Image: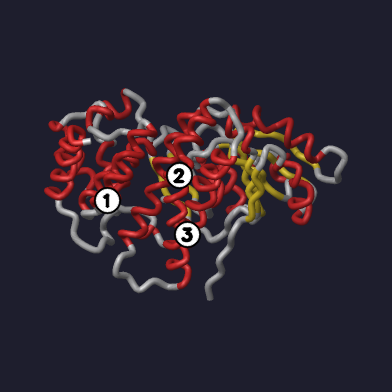
Amino acid sequence: MKTQFFPGYTIGNDSYKNIVKICSLYGKKAAVIGGERAIKAAENKIKNSVEGSEMLITGFFPFGKEASIENIERLKLIPEVQKADMIFAVGGGKAIDTGKVLAQKTNRVFFTFPTIASTCASCTSLGILYHPDGSLREYTFSNITPVHIFIDSEIIANAPDKYFWAGIGDSMAKYFESSVSSRGDELNHSQSMGVNIASMCNGPFVKYGVQALEDCKKNKLSNELEEIILGIIISTGYVSNLVNIDLNTGLAHAVYNGFTVIPQIEKYGHLHGEIVSYGILVLLVVDRQKEEFERIFKFNKEMGFPTKLSDLHCSIEDVDKIIEKALKGIDVRHYPYTVASEMIKDAILFIEDFQHKC
């Protein structure tokens, strides 16, 4: 037997007005768990949305800066959290994953309130947990997704635009990786639907991305901004819920993992999605998608994404270390062909040389 859950969503600067209508079906008490800045941005809107209703917010509780087992256990012991019928998870990926896994482990429904658009965490059932020192601990797998996602586009428009920028780079990989990783496979219904939905992480991003980023920098609400927010949170999230881990990743993320061994990446604060956007270029060259490579290379230039090693404070001397780490993970274990180290190196050298041809 297979059961597939999908969250609903509301987007707009007044999306929280739907809280009572939707959430009261599942109880009357909600505990809000989130990042400190996220709670500050969303607290008044959440309070105003339930004022005069039978719904009660039992409290607003910072998640503790790391999505860790230790923080989840700490939150479980808070009386106001114990009394809640449901969990409201507010913030970015780690804050939402903390509330998500807490709700899953205590058999309660949860709702998500993303305050930045950088990942699809607010849409998925997957949780990513870390040790208190920030190192990766484990992935938690469940088929329980949030019941509903409340996307306040005004809050996101006023969040730091660097997260939105990086979210675009990361989200676009969903299409390129799933389409290549699934090539030649006999896909079941869910996987096939996921791979097809992933096409929404290609065309709309190129169409609206540049203007959406400009609007985010100006803290301006626009149709383009909301289209990209939905792409980052909903399109990628639905794909993640539908396909297995091998179709959820690929060469772009392998390249990202490779760069993590280079000290300059952390030193200069390069973001996950920023590096993944460069990884997409490597993927397209390796896969011999010439026209797509040229189209995405141009888009990366317009977006300010890296298109050469020096953009990531790296050089040719770093490439062998990057490739060694890239091929150690699971990202290309399921691929239509074997990815050899020479293929990645040749692709990087090609991209370096391409700078002078455009």
Q: Quadrant of the image for the C terminus?
A: top left
* Label 2 – label 1 distance at C-alpha: 16 Å
C-alpha span from label 3 to label 2: 17 Å
Residue drawn where x is 63% and y is 48% of the image: 149
Percent of width and height locating residue 108: 66, 54
Q: Secondary structure at mark 2?
A: helix
Mark 3 or 1, which is nearer the eye? 1
Label 2 crowd (10 A; few <14 / some 14-19 / many >=20) = some
Label drawn at residue 291: 1
Relative to residue 349, is residue 60 drawn left or right? right
> At which x and y percent is residue 112?
62, 45
Callout 1 environment at 10 Å: few (<14), some (14 to 19), or many (20+)?
few
| Location of residue 215 with respect to 238 vertically, above or below | above
Pointer 2 residue: 207
Amino acid bearing label 3? Ile
Report, in whole angstroms, how far the alpha carbon at label 3 lies from the one at label 1. 22 Å
Residue 197 is marked as 3
